[in-house]
Amino acid sequence: MTMAASQTRTAGVTATDVREVMVQIRADLRTLRAMHRMITEATEAAYAADLTKWVYRGYVADIQFWYFEPTGTPRYGTSYALDRQWAGRPGGEAGGLEFVNLAGTTFHLRVTYSTAWQRLGAQEKQEFYQTLDLPWGSAPHVQTSGGSWAIDRTYASGALAATRSVYRAG
């Protein structure tokens, strides 16, 4: 006698999904830190902890790591577009970020708020900010004219995916 079973996934994004995807994003952040030494290991850990909270709550649509010239012009960046209704395959190996000479630039981390964040009231936003390790505030939109974006991989687990794009100035 043969028995078979199948399971249909009906749940949304789980804590496991967030953890698995954030491990990959943090691995990229660690690679950038190791190559360019612009943030400390403690800052990397605080960024990762805060980003995990942002992603778990569904408050961000996009995570961005930027390297800016002293003039404010972006030279290099990585962006992770989040999809909370992923139906593709899980996986995606972290890495593959090539060394780029970023001497003289400064590192910035930015997030793009989701509609879930925009629907929150001021009190709810303030309560969430109090759970974070680092201070967060608003930042102007990054102008990327004169460069190019390339989508190079997707990190995914369950219903959550992060599609990585890399920006290089022209």
Image (tube, rainbow, N blue to C red):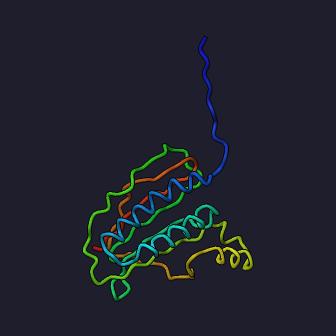
Is 66 left, or right, of 50 in this rendering? Answer: left
Please determine whether, in this image, residue 91 is positioned above or below residue 76: above
Identify the residue shown where x is 59% and y is 55%.
84
Q: Percent position (x, y) of residue 136? A: 57, 80
Is 35 left, or right, of 19 in this rendering? Answer: left
Please determine whether, in this image, residue 23 is positioned above or below residue 124: above
- Dividing the picture into quarters, in which one does residue 40 lie? bottom left
- For the C terminus, which image quadrant? bottom left
Residue reaching furthest front? 42
Is 121 left, or right, of 148 in this rendering? Answer: right
Residue 67 or 45: which is nearer the viewer? 45
**Numbered marks: total:** 0
- Dividing the picture into quarters, in which one does residue 132 lie? bottom right
- Dividing the picture into quarters, in which one does residue 31 lie? bottom left
Q: Percent position (x, y) of residue 114? A: 61, 67
Identify the residue shown where x is 61% and y is 61%.
56
Identify the residue shown where x is 58% and y is 63%.
55
Q: Percent position (x, y) of residue 68? A: 36, 81
Please determine whether, in this image, residue 51 is positioned above or below residue 143: above
Identify the residue shown where x is 39% and y is 55%.
94
- For the N terminus, which image quadrant? top right
Residue reaching furthest bottom? 71
